[in-house]
Image: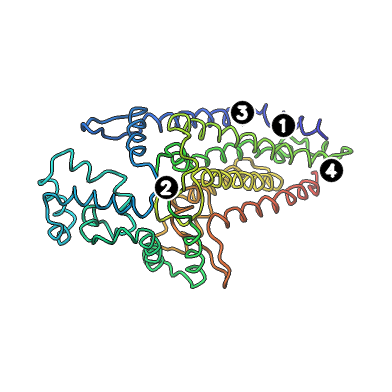
């Protein structure tokens, strides 16, 4: 059996078209991740535009300057310090009553470049986000807070979740009572107090999840000829008439295909995660995922959230591998098989949703849409069935595990029953 598996793996690896495509996609991933590092941009404290590793170092320095536990005392001090800076030259009542553009113009005129830059420090944008409504600037939010508001920091986070549920994905989705209870319970399970710090490498991996779609395409290309290649080469008659042609050989083909998919996905993961963590840093994996956004209702660390997302991508890869095997066992045209898989991976990302949340819920189940950290962890995407509710993360895992479990035996059965012409 092992000899058959090795033989089938060798057949997968020596096909020139598959080899070129798979190697080319790995090289492309290396280039994409290198550009991801090189094109990182930020502005220094001296208004100098920084790029690449210099920009990463500056972002890390700014985050590290504010690292620590966000307990009640610290939040109170930080809010008081910001208000002291923001309203040292401007009356908060004047800012609160202005439009966004007018408030910006007033603050820009009143403060120097260094002070104005401090007002837009990403940390303060993050800190005031629980109280933010609409497109208000951080100093407009601060202007609306009284002296005791900071004591209700975590209550404000919980309140924002309820406002998000009330908003119903921009008014296009109505959350059921079961969904509201599900997300509220999730939020209640997030540990307090939260910690803030630098987790640039882990956040970059989450931002690059969509690149795993290229690895899925490569796997589909390589597995397309597993069965259909035998039909085209007219070797199916010989194989199926051999002693183990309808038993061990079929099993060896499937084991080799899934082993190849696993190994290739591991290489893609090594490239995407390795480059991101090497250049952006691997620290911060133990920080809560809420360093990305205080609105995320998952009790996960950055490392746990990242590995969860990568695990979902792996299940997607195996599910698509199983689907490719099924199509390969049914169709002779390798082009048709690849076109079908590529359409499921990429073309589903081009379908206009038109603000239709029902359609969006369906589209999120496909790789190019679902592999997005904001969608997975921050969009409150859930699927109710009566009183039972499952979130997008759980449903993606179930769907692709079921696709794999269904397609693999169907592919084996179809090839065994293939009638040789």
- Please state if 132 lies on the left or on the right of 400 as rendered: left
Check contact, mark 3 vs mark 1: CB within 8 A: no
- Please state if 394 lies on the left or on the right of 70 as rendered: right
Q: Which mark is residue 247?
A: 4
- Residue that mark 1 sits on: 9
Question: Closer to the N terminus: mark 3 or mark 4?
Answer: 3
Check contact, mark 2 vs mark 1: CB within 8 A: no
Measured in 3D between alpha carbons, the distance from the residue under mark 2 to the one under mark 1, in whole angstroms, is 47 Å
Measured in 3D between alpha carbons, the distance from the residue under mark 3 to the one under mark 4, in whole angstroms, is 27 Å
Question: Closer to the N terminus: mark 3 or mark 2?
Answer: 3
Image quarter in which the N terminus is found: top right
> How would you rate the neighbour count of disc 4 (Cα within 10 Å): few for under 14, some for 14-19, many for 20 or more?
some
Which is closer to the viewer, label 2 or label 1?
2
Image quarter in which the C terminus is found: top right
Tag 3, which secondary structure? helix
- Residue that mark 2 sits on: 195
Q: Nearer the viewer, residue 241 or 304?
A: 304
- Please state if 336 lies on the left or on the right of 199 as rendered: right
Q: Nearer the viewer, residue 323 or 383?
A: 383
- Give the residue at x 53% y 64%: 383
Q: Position of residue 114 (x, y in %)?
A: 18, 38
> How would you rate the neighbour count of disc 2 (Cα within 10 Å): few for under 14, some for 14-19, many for 20 or more?
some
- Give the residue at x 24% y 45%: 120
- Residue that mark 3 sits on: 19
Tag 1, which secondary structure? helix
Question: Closer to the N terminus: mark 4 or mark 1?
Answer: 1
């Amino acid at each position: 059996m092992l000899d058959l598996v090795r033989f089938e793996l060798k057949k997968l690896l020596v096909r020139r078209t598959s080899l070129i495509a798979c190697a080319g996609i790995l090289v492309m991933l290396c280039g994409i991740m290198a550009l991801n590092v090189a094109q990182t941009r930020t502005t220094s404290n001296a208004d100098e535009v920084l790029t690449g590793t210099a920009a990463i170092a500056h972002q890390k320095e700014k985050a590290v300057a504010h690292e620590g536990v966000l307990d009640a005392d610290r939040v109170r001090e930080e809010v008081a310090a910001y208000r002291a800076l923001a309203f040292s030259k401007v009356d908060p009542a004047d800012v609160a009553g202005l439009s966004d553009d007018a408030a910006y113009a007033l603050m820009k005129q009143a403060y120097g470049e260094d002070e104005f830059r401090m007002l837009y420090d990403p940390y303060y944008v993050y800190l005031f986000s629980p109280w933010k409504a609409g497109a208000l600037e951080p100093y407009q939010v601060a202007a609306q807070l009284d002296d005791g508001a900071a004591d209700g920091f975590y209550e404000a986070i919980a309140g924002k979740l309820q406002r998000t549920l009330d908003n119903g994905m921009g008014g296009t989705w109505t959350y059921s009572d079961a969904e509201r209870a599900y997300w509220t319970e999730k939020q209640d399970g997030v540990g307090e107090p939260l910690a803030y710090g630098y987790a640039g490498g882990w956040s970059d991996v989450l931002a690059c999840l969509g690149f795993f779609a290229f690895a899925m395409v490569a796997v589909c290309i390589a597995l397309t000829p597993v069965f259909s290649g035998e039909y085209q080469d007219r070797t199916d008659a010989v194989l199926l008439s051999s002693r183990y042609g309808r038993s061990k050989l079929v099993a060896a083909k499937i084991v080799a295909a899934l082993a190849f998919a696993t190994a290739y996905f591991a290489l893609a993961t090594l490239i995407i995660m390795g480059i991101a963590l090497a250049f952006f840093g691997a620290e911060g994996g133990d920080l809560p995922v809420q360093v990305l956004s205080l609105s995320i209702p998952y009790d996960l660390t950055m490392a746990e959230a990242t590995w969860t997302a990568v695990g979902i991508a792996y299940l997607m890869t195996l599910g698509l591998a199983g689907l490719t095997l099924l199509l390969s066992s049914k169709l002779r045209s390798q082009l048709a098989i690849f076109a079908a898989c590529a359409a499921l991976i990429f073309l589903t990302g081009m379908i206009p949703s038109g603000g239709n949340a029902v359609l969006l819920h369906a589209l999120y189940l496909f790789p190019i849409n679902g592999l997005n950290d904001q969608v997975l962890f921050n969009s409150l995407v859930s699927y109710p069935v009566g009183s039972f509710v499952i979130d997008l993360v759980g449903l993606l895992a179930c769907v692709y595990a079921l696709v794999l479990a269904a397609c693999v035996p169907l592919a084996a059965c179809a090839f065994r029953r293939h009638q040789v012409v």
